Amino acid sequence: MGQFDGQVAYITGIARGQGRNHALRFAKEGAAVIGMDIADRVADHMTYPPATSDDLAETVRLVEEAGGKILARQGDTRDLAFQQQLVADGVAQFGRLDHVIANAGILTWGLTWELTEEQFTDVVDVNLVGTWKTLKATIPAMLEAGNGGSIVIISSCAGMKAMPAQASYSASKFGLRGLAQTAAKELGPEKIRVNTVHPYAVNTPMGVEDPEGLKAFQKWGRHFPSIMDHYPVASVDDLTDAVFYLSTAAAVTGSEFQIDMGATKV
């Protein structure tokens, strides 16, 4: 028996990294997965490798290889109609919706006054507005199912402690805290819990394969250290462990769960 037998999870950004790991582990624990990813370059100003349609196909293959059920489509979190249709089709196929993991996001680098308009608005639109659209698309299905459930929003330690050269990213991730707090208060009476997770560096292309991130660390390193020098980068399993805990912790809502090696305390 699995921890999530008979349940259904909606996960954004599943093509690789954290999202793929969440999808695979939910499937291994018995949940059907409804997933999406843009699986393409979101913006020209991204300086780390983008996910691809092949990555998304590999996630589907891995989930099915593990015996899981999955409905996955390529699309943009900023496209509300796309998300609403995917949710409707997923619920029609699997019968319910229990968990939402709002994982999709992008990062760009630059000084506050030197960022282009696109660098600021693209990041806020994907990370904050796109997550709101994820909630707008999924919450009605959770309410209709009447099973309660859990929403986990992946923010960042940059949403707890603003970082230099990350004005748009930090603003979007701070914004997710407010969004989550509001939703937690609204959905408490419906037995739906809403929490945020705040990672520091994670072993994904965004986390470790961005040359601009390395430059920022070299220039403003005093703002980026963690407490755990022996464990500088979290694994994707570290993040899924946190998501699993929050998805099952009946007494936890409105929390801000930091998987940051102590970085927000430095």
Image (cartoon, grey):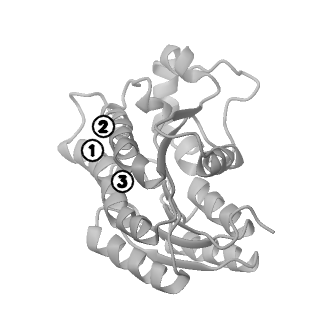
Tell me the residue that label 1 is attached to: 119
Secondary structure of residue under mark 1: helix
Q: Quadrant of the C terminus?
A: top right
Q: Position of residue 12 (x, y in %)?
A: 47, 62
Q: Position of residue 195 (x, y in %)?
A: 49, 42
Q: Amino acid at mark 2?
A: Ser
Tell me the residue that label 2 is attached to: 168
- In the rendered view, tell whether residue 248 sits above or below residue 163: below
Q: Nearer the viewer, residue 88 or 121?
A: 88
Confirm or deny contact between disc 1 and disc 3 (CB under 8 A).
no
Instruction: Single out the mark in the foreground, 2 or 1.
Output: 2
Q: Amino acid at mark 1?
A: Gln
Mark 2 or mark 1, earlier in chain: 1
Residue positioned 49% across, 31% down in the render:
157
Residue positioned 43% across, 83% down in the render:
89
Mark 1 or mark 3, earlier in chain: 1
Q: Position of residue 210 (x, y in %)?
A: 51, 43
Secondary structure of residue under mark 2: helix
Q: Residue furthest bottom?
A: 93
Q: Residue furthest right?
A: 1
Q: Residue furthest front?
A: 189
Q: Quadrant of residue 112?
A: top left
Q: Is residue 69 left or right of residue 128?
A: right
Q: Position of residue 10 (x, y in %)?
A: 50, 66
Instruction: Single out the mark in the foreground, 1 or 3.
Output: 3
Instruction: Single out the mark in the foreground, 3 or 2.
Output: 3
Confirm or deny contact between disc 2 and disc 1 (CB under 8 A).
yes
Q: Is residue 130 left or right of residue 207?
A: left
Residue positioned 70% across, 62% down in the render:
25
Q: Amino acid at mark 3?
A: Thr
